[in-house]
Each structure stands twice: as C-alpha cells, then as structure tokens.
Image: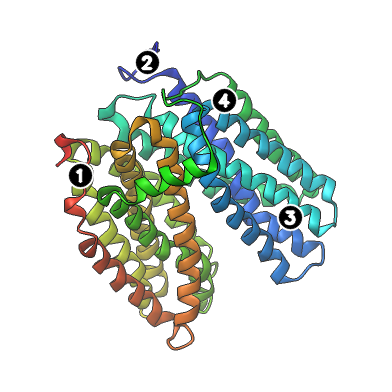
Amino acid sequence: METNQTAVPGIQREFYLSIAAGVLFIAVNFIGLSLVPVYVLDLGYSDFLAGLQNTVFSVFCVAFRFILGPMADHKGRRLMMHIGAGSFVAGPLMMLVAGSLYPVILVARVIMAVGMASFLSAANCYVAESVPDSFLGTAIGIQRGLYSLSLMVAPALGLMLARSDAGYTGLFLAAAGLGLVSFLLVSLMREHRPDCGDNQSIGRSLRESGGLLTRPDMGRAYLALFSISVSYGAILSYAAIYLERFGSIGNPGVYFTFFAGSGLVGSVVAGILSDRFGRRRVAAPLMLSMAVGVALLYLVPVQPVLFMILSGLLAGTSFTGAMAVLISWLLDMAPASLRGTAMGLQENSIDSGLAVGSLVFAVLTLGFTQQMVFPMLGILGILIPFRLKLKKVVSHPEQI
C-alpha cells in the first residue's frame, strides 16, 4: 500500500483521519450513554426504564460484535467504520422521530449498538495498520487518550445544549452532525483489507473467535482486559454514590474529571513506554496501580478530597494506560487477517467486565459496606496480574 509521509516517518495520513473520525464517533457514544437516560427521565419514565435502554444497547453491542467484528477482516476496515458512523447518524435522528415513544427509543439504541459493534474494532485495526510497528503503542495511546478527552467534554457540552433553548432537538441534531462528520472523514480514508477472502459465515466467525480465545497468550490478555474493566465498572456505577456521602467533596462527579483527565496523559505515556520497553513490562505494573487506585477509596473518610483526587488520578492513569498497552499487545499477537475479530473480542471483554463489575459490587454490598468493597476489589486486582502470569504472554520477540 502506498504511504503518505508526515512528520513522523512511516505514519500515514489516514492515521490522523481515523483518530479524528474516532474522537467524533466516541463523543456521540458518550452523549448517548450519559444523556439519553436523562432524556428518558425528562419524558416522565421511571429510573428503571432510563437505565434499561443502556442495558439493551450494551447487550446488543456484545451480540453484534461476534458477527460485525470479523467482518472488518473480510469486508474491510473502512466499510465497517462507515457502517458505524452511519448508524451514529441514524440513531440520533431516530431519537427525534421517537418523541415520547419508549419502544422507538429502544430501536434507536439498537441502531447505535450496530454502530458501536462495527466501528471501534475496525478503527483499532486501521490505526495499527497506518503506523510503523515501533509506533503502535504510542498510536493506540493517543487514540485512547483522545477518547478520554471526549468523555470529559461531550456529555457536559451536550447537557448544556439540552438545557438551552435548542433543547433535546438541538442535542440530537448535533449528535447526528458529529456522526455525519465522522462518516465524511472515513470517506477520505483508503480501504484496509487483509487478504483473507470473502467466504464469511456466522459459524466461521464464531470458530475464529474461539480460536483466538483458546490461544494461551491472547486468552490471558483478554482476561487482563476483563479484570481491569470489572474494577472500572464498579467505579462507574458506585463511586459517585459513595463519594456523595461526604459533604466536603461537594460535587462527586469531579472524581471522573480527575479520572478522565489523568487517563488522557496516562494512555499516551503508557503507549510510548510499551513501544520502548515492551508490552509486558508496562502492563502488569499498570494493573497493580489500578488496583491500588481503587483501594484508595477506602481511605476517603480520612481525608475526603485528598483521597478522592489521589484515587481518581491513579486509577484513571492506570486504567486508560493499561487499556492502551493491552490493546496494542493484542494487535501485536493477532494475525493480520484476524485483527478485526481480535478487536471485537477485546471490546466484548471490556463491556463484559463493566457489567460484571457493577453486578459484583452490588452483590458484595449485601454483606459489606461500600467502603469495604472497594479495597476488596483492589486486593483482587493485585492478585490477578500474578494469576494471569503476564510475564509469559508473548508478542513480538523483541518485546520479551
């Protein structure tokens, strides 16, 4: 494939286009996850139905990825990114059509689930194939860091727009506009398609997914992603509820500002370090520090503001950094013809961990206080890197 030289030798112009398209795409996703529940509540529906639409979205994301992830290998990366971005135009517009009809809102979320299942795994592959191998960790770190920036900015700006004269009509039109710009940016990119043929079926997709999961090296990496996502799921669901009890904190949502802000820096630094020193030398320490960051929430009653900030900074840096390194590691290990399949499994590992983390935390609170559950998850997070024997996970020989 012909390459376009830029400031960093070997980096193609498409790398920058794919990053920009991905940032806009993920911004629409964060708007959906954070503000559609608010919209449903404002329509007069219950808290249960406000949360149910996100559950439906997540379940369909996981289910669709088993089919749409492998299609990035057989039909091409750009095509699947086009499908994803197009779904993020159609979904918000469907929200406008829905009005106050909850079943139509669910249809809109299912359409957006098609987008999530199509876009992200293909985008990871595209980024990996647009940079030299020696820059892969840094590239994925930049990508995940900018996704964190979207998390910091998009929901806040979206809520401001929804509360303005433009209302939710303006919000959903703006979200559709972001999806459209993402679609147009993808149109400027060249197709990346491994030479693996078009003979694709559901059965073959499942067999390919099973083959990757049963590889000991990749299986451990998927489990590592799952384990840190369990802690992240608990934080997303319960950190604000826990911190709200401490009056000196004021706004518990600030925790996620520190979490996402530190993640922006942490993912880039972790990616650079993993390119220089190897994935395994960076992944395990980050998983350990993530566990410590979660456990620090136990100390919030001692100095609420101090330990809230320390936990947010350490957990955010570690989670986003570990995510970037582990994704880079999977891209190292996956055959080029199965990278889309591998990235679909990666996204499902994260989503499954988020769901399990929320559930496990809820179950543990039946017998323990929330304050005690956070260090319990932290201890579990400290043990998992050793149990997974990450030092035995191999990718490129030069990274051993």
Could you tell whether 394 is left or right of 87 in the image? left
Which residue is depicted at the point 50% across and 77% down? Answer: 362
Which quadrant does the C terminus fall into?
top left
Give the amino acid at mark 1: Val
- Frontmost of labels 2 and 1 is 1
Which residue is depicted at the point 34% across and 77% down? Answer: 376
Q: CA distance from mark 3 to mark 2?
A: 43 Å
Provide the residue designation for mark 4.
Answer: 186
Please report whichever mark, 1 or 3, sits nearer to the chain's N-terminal start: 3
Give the amino acid at mark 2: Thr
Question: Which type of secondary structure does the marked residue at label 1 adopt?
Answer: loop
Provide the residue designation for mark 3.
Answer: 106
Q: Residue furthest bottom?
A: 367
Give the amino acid at mark 4: Val
Could you tell whether 277 is left or right of 163 in the image? left
Please report whichever mark, 4 or 1, sits nearer to the chain's N-terminal start: 4
Give the amino acid at mark 3: Leu
When asked about the image quadrant of residue 227, the answer is: bottom left
Please report whichever mark, 2 or 4, sits nearer to the chain's N-terminal start: 2
Provide the residue designation for mark 1.
Answer: 394
Compared with 319, 10 (above or below) is: above
Provide the residue designation for mark 2.
Answer: 6
Q: CA distance from mark 3 to mark 4?
A: 27 Å
- Frontmost of labels 3 and 2 is 3
Question: Which type of secondary structure does the marked residue at label 4 adopt?
Answer: helix
Residue 145: tell me if it is visible: no
